[in-house]
Amino acid sequence: MLVLPDEIRTQRLVLRKPRASDSPQIFSSYTSNAAVARFMVWRPHQEISETAEFIAYCMEAWDGNDKRPYVLALVDREDIPIGMLEGRLLSHTVDIGYVLEQKHWGSGLMSEAVTALSDAALALPDCFRVQATCDVENVASARTLKKSGFSLEGRLERFAVHPNIDPTPRPCLMFSRHKSTEAN
């Protein structure tokens, strides 16, 4: 069974468990922002209660064994969330998804977080792969994954619904980092 750490620290970030008190900041900084939600599988939140429900779900999921939805915060402001990075734990794989407050786009923070989570996952004896998908038009996300050491594996047709773009499934790109087969 894969078990990711409770907290991951980088030079600039802390990846930590979500708190109920995160909801107002998350709502104002990104869940209500249409530009941030564009390539997400959810629509922008209209009410803070939607974000509070989402954070409650994340807190509950954290206590299970199949997901780690980390809140991202700057190390000098750990109480102020700026994004999230979720690791969904599969048998030998961690599937990730992420979101970042718009004012931090282009800063390298997400690639720093993705690299740290991937390193932690691949250090586990039973984890052989970390993977992520992004919409074919999400150039910034593809760049983040490449900067984090991921390789493009292919295009998945009709893979995910991004409701802010189209109500039908869209093509996505599959990226991964993995342990080499020679290491076994």
Image (spheres, rainbow, N blue to C red):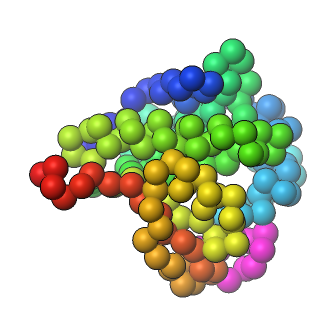
Give percent across and percent down for residue 60.
Answer: 51, 38
Q: Is residue 129 left or right of residue 1?
A: right
- Pick the residue in front: 77 or 119: 119
Q: Which residue is situated farthest in the left direction here?
A: 184
Which residue is pictured at 55% across the width and 30% down the height? 15
Give percent across and percent down for residue 134.
Answer: 59, 65
Marker count (numbered): 0
- Magenta residue check for 161: yes
Give percent across and percent down for residue 55.
Answer: 65, 39
- Residue 25: tell me if it is visible: yes
- Magenta residue check for 16: no
**What's the magenta bit mostly, secondary-structure-wise?**
loop
Which residue is pictured at 43% across the width and 71% down the height? 153
Q: Which residue is situated farthest in the top direction here?
A: 76
Give percent across and percent down for residue 37.
Answer: 77, 57
Q: Is residue 73 left or right of residue 133?
A: right
- Residue 68: tell me if it is visible: no
- Pick the residue in front: 121 or 69: 121
| Above or below 82: residue 181 | below
Which residue is pictured at 36% across the width and 41% down the height? 121
The quarter of the picture where residue 157 lies is bottom right
| Above or below 67: residue 4 | above
The quarter of the picture where residue 159 lies is bottom right
The quarter of the picture where residue 90 lies is bottom left
Quarter in which the N terminus is drawn: top left
Which residue is pictured at 54% across the width and 72% down the height? 173
Instruction: Specify the segment rendered in magenta.
Output: 160-168
| Above or below 113: residue 127 | below
